[in-house]
Image (tube, coloured by chain):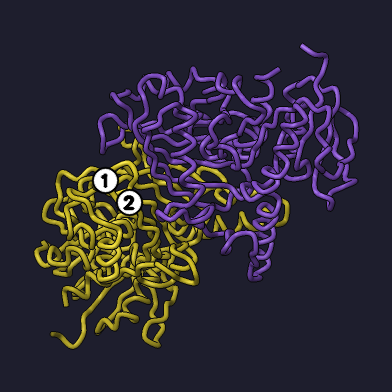
Chain colours: A purple, B yellow
């Protein structure tokens, strides 16, 4: 093991990028040099890391020379633009965008589930979609008991999924409503405060959105189950940063509720909620600003003897994005 | 037809009771005399009706003499207490509580779906659960094409389901948050502003809540499908008064998306959302303070060839409660 690694964060001033910097510190990643990269408009901003202030630089094609790892927290277009330069520099690109997730030769990794996959890569490893991470963390312990055949999921997704602008939009709408003013919106297609919006991503042609199809496509790759079927409805709710998912999952054989509870209790990164302050369920507020996926309300599916229902919550910015990426990095060092 | 009917509203000062009074006016029910009844603490309050102010009286055993219909908007215990007195008086009790819904001889009615059932009654007709009404309105047109085998539903339920106290609690929490204060709660088991709570009702012993089991039990009775199976997850969201439900429904045969769209377009009380302000979905805000159930996002269920997914929203206080009760009354006159 080296004494420390040279690590760059690309998109260091966004919500996920900032969380990556904190996670590098929290997970005690041995960092020799940390380089913070962003667009020209963020050049010169400063971020604290391990007691120092680090100045953000403008990302360009040469920013990655000498780096061991690049953590990516930028949109697909930027990820695609910079990826060849990162790979050419010899660094491993751990990318939170969806640009490369389904590409052959690019591992798509949740460390607790398919960490082994990360070891064979050609310089790019993708971080899965946030709702997919949280849903699969909840069911991976069960999938080890019997293969998953299908998933029907309805999400309750926090505004942090739309980044800083999403957080600010909900806050400003709450303030407007409490002043009796009309909330304005630009990030979401409609008022989100005191409302829910059942459409996230783009139409993919089969009436499912891009966000919804990720659950099926990414789960197949992560669980190594190419025939898995998943029907998902993605809904934005006025919650700051934890996603919740109502999941109905079917297995090849019947899994009892008590078998399921044991499997979830034993699965790393999961917390089974049986009696938490008298409740049998987590809420998004409970699970914000921590790294576990909390799972409760495990029930037999009354419509299918081989099915279970459950409710799970996890911090979208942390385990749903930044922390999972840093955990992938941790696997590699 | 009589010139007008003597009608009492029991629980006239609650959210649903007030809406019943408005609905009697809006639906032009011929009212000879309107009697408003509530508990002692509301005695003397006044409510407008057809241009007059009507004074609320304290409900007692003799309040129903001479009434033709009593619309009930009280809790189960009060409904059970007053029902024998109402029936003895010769009035028909149209009850919004869940006290009698599953009783033999008590019709459970959504007028557009099983209005015929209302005609055979022994003095009590029950109004179904709000989420059940909205879900079944969305799928009844499809059920006419092929019998429903099963439903998996996740709800996004408004705070109005907890009455005036629910509405006030969300409003006061929004105000507290915008002042940077800690929200207090007493009606809901946790902060509901900027949160969601996946537990409504009481535990029934199979880990489903009483609210969740209503979808299966009441749907069987309303659709006349005693073998129908339904797995429901009921979730409170910080929305004022419209419920939304994410529904996966399976039929005996395959129903195509275009068949489903046509059936929903043609079904009374429903509005199919294909292109509403550029959107293919309703939100709870769109559907507040009106009487239709809006349905969008109809998709093939990728996990079952005989299944469809859809999203529906409806005003919980109106079609989910008060308006459905007044529509039942309308059937009987």
Subunit ID for the residue under disc 2: B
Residue B58 in view (yes/no): no
Q: Secondary structure at mark 1?
A: loop
Which residue is farthest top? Answer: A1
Classify residue B5 as left or right of residue B240.
left
Percent position of residue B78, x then y: 30, 56
Classify residue A322 as left or right of residue B65.
right
Q: Secondary structure at mark 2?
A: strand
- Image quarter for residue B75? bottom left
Pointer 1 with pointer 2, Cβ within 8 A: yes
The quarter of the picture where the C terminus of chain B appears is: bottom left
Q: Is residue B12 above or below residue B224?
A: below
Residue B85 in view (yes/no): yes
Percent position of residue A98, x then y: 59, 42
Q: Is residue B202 above or below residue A2?
A: below
The one nearer the camera, A276 or A249, is A249
The one nearer the camera, A288 or B7, is A288
Residue A135: numbered disc: none
The one nearer the camera, B257 or B277, is B257
Subunit ID for the residue under disc 1: B
For mark 1, what is the residue?
A: B305
- Image quarter for residue B67? bottom left
The one nearer the camera, B219 or B57, is B219
User: Which class describes the residues within 10 Å of circle 1: few (<14), some (14-19), or many (20+)?
Assistant: some
For mark 2, what is the residue?
A: B300
Between the residue at mark 1 and the residue at mark 2, the CA separation in whole angstroms equals: 7 Å
Q: Residue at x 21, y 59 (%)?
A: B83
Percent position of residue B214, x then y: 28, 48
Percent position of residue A201, x then y: 54, 53
Q: Residue at x 83, y 27 (%)?
A: A66
């Amino acid at each position: 093991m080296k004494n420390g690694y040279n690590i760059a964060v690309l998109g260091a001033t966004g919500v996920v990028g900032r969380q990556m910097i904190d996670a590098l510190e929290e997970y005690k990643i041995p960092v020799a040099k940390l380089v913070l990269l962003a667009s020209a408009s963020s050049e010169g901003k400063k971020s604290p890391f391990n007691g120092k202030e680090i100045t953000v630089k403008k990302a360009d094609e040469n920013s990655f020379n000498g780096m061991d790892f690049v953590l990516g927290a930028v949109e697909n277009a930027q990820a695609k633009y910079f990826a060849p330069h990162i790979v050419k520099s010899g660094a491993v690109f751990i990318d939170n965008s969806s640009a490369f997730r389904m590409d052959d030769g690019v591992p798509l990794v949740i460390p607790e589930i398919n960490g082994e996959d990360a070891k064979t890569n050609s310089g790019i490893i993708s971080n899965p979609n946030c709702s997919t991470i949280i849903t699969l963390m909840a069911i991976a312990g069960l999938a080890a008991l019997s293969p998953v055949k299908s998933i029907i999921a309805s999400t309750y997704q926090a505004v942090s999924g739309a980044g800083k602008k999403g957080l600010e939009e909900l806050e400003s709408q709450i303030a407007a409503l409490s002043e009796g003013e009309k909330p304005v919106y630009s990030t979401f297609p409609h008022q989100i405060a005191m409302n829910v919006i059942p459409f996230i991503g783009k139409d993919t042609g089969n009436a499912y959105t891009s966000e919804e199809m990720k659950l099926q496509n990414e789960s197949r790759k992560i669980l190594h189950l190419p025939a898995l079927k998943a029907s998902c409805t993605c809904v934005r709710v006025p919650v700051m940063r934890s996603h919740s998912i109502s999941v109905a999952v079917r297995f090849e054989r019947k899994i009892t509720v008590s078998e399921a509870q044991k499997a979830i209790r034993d699965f790393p990164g999961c917390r089974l909620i049986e009696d938490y302050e008298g409740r049998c369920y987590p809420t998004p507020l409970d699970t914000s600003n921590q790294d576990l996926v909390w799972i409760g309300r495990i029930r037999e599916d009354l419509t299918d003897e081989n099915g279970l229902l459950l409710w799970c919550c996890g911090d979208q910015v942390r385990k749903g994005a930044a922390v999972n990426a840093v955990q992938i990095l941790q696997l590699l060092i």
